[in-house]
Every structure is written in structure tokens, then in C-alpha cells.
Image: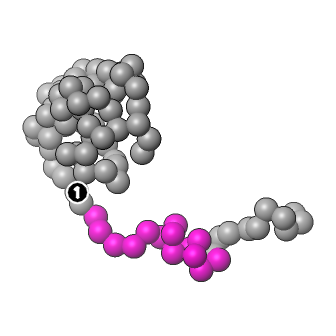
Amino acid sequence: MLPSGQAAAEAFYRVIDAAYERRSVIVTSNLHPSGFDSIMPKTPATAAVDRLLHHAHIVSTEGSSLRLTQATTGQGVVPLNQPG
């Protein structure tokens, strides 16, 4: 995840706030919610996480990455210099 600016952070917060206690929202991330302030300004990050976690069902997965395993074993990878 890349850092976002103030406008993107506010837009994310507005989506979460609009759905808060009205609709279901699914957010997937490889970043723990406590780290959201590392990719967006702290105030909208804290407000968004507060609303996201209030009634949340958190599903945490662990294990190796299927894509990384495939890439490191050469499966599904086609070299760019290979004729089509």
C-alpha cells in the first residue's frame, strides 16, 4: 500500500462514514488497522478505523503467498524476452 494524500484519505473516510451503521463494508489489506496512519494522515485514518472496527468481524489469514510461491518456482511466469 502506498501513502495517500489528504484528499484520498478524506474520500476513504467519507465512504466508510456514509456506510457506518447503514451498510456492510469489506476492506482487505495486508496492513493491520493500527498502521493505517502510516499510509494516510492520522485524523482520517483514526476516524475511518474507528468506524470500521466498531461492529467488525475481523478475518485474519496467515500463510505463504500463493503468488510469491508461483513466482519463485517459475510457475505462471513468462519471461518478457520470450517470443509469443
Callout 1: few (<14), some (14-19), or many (20+) C-alpha neighbours within 10 Å?
few
Check if residue 8 falls in the magenta segment. Answer: no
- Where residue 14 sits in the image (x, y, percent)? 29, 20
Q: Residue at x 29, y 29 (%)?
A: 41
Question: Residue shown at 14%/34% (left/top)?
Answer: 50
Residue at 25% x, 51% y is: 32
Vertical relation: 22 (above or below) 72? above
The quadrant holding residue 53 is top left
> Can residue 27 be seen by looking at this rendering?
yes
Q: Quadrant of the C terminus?
A: bottom right
- Depth check, front residue: 42 or 62: 42
Amino acid of disc 1: Val
Under circle 1, the secondary element is: loop
Residue furthest right in the image: 83
Residue 48 in view in this figure: no
Relative placement, left or right, of 30 versus 76 is left
Q: Is residue 59 left or right of residue 55?
A: right
The answer to whether 41 is drawn above or below residue 55 in the figure is: above
Which quadrant does the N terminus fall into?
top left
Q: Is residue 12 left or right of residue 55?
A: right
Query: Residue 33: percent from the left, percent from the top?
Result: 22, 45
Residue 23 placement (x, y as % from top left): 23, 30
Q: Which residues are magenta?
A: 61-74
On screen, residue 14 above or below 79: above
Residue 35 falls in image quadrant = top left
- Along the horizontal axis of the image, is 75 left or right of 69? right
Extreme residue toward the bottom, this view: 73
Q: Which residue is mark 1?
A: 59
The front one of 21 and 17 is 17
Q: Looking at the image, which residue is at 51% across and 75% down?
A: 69
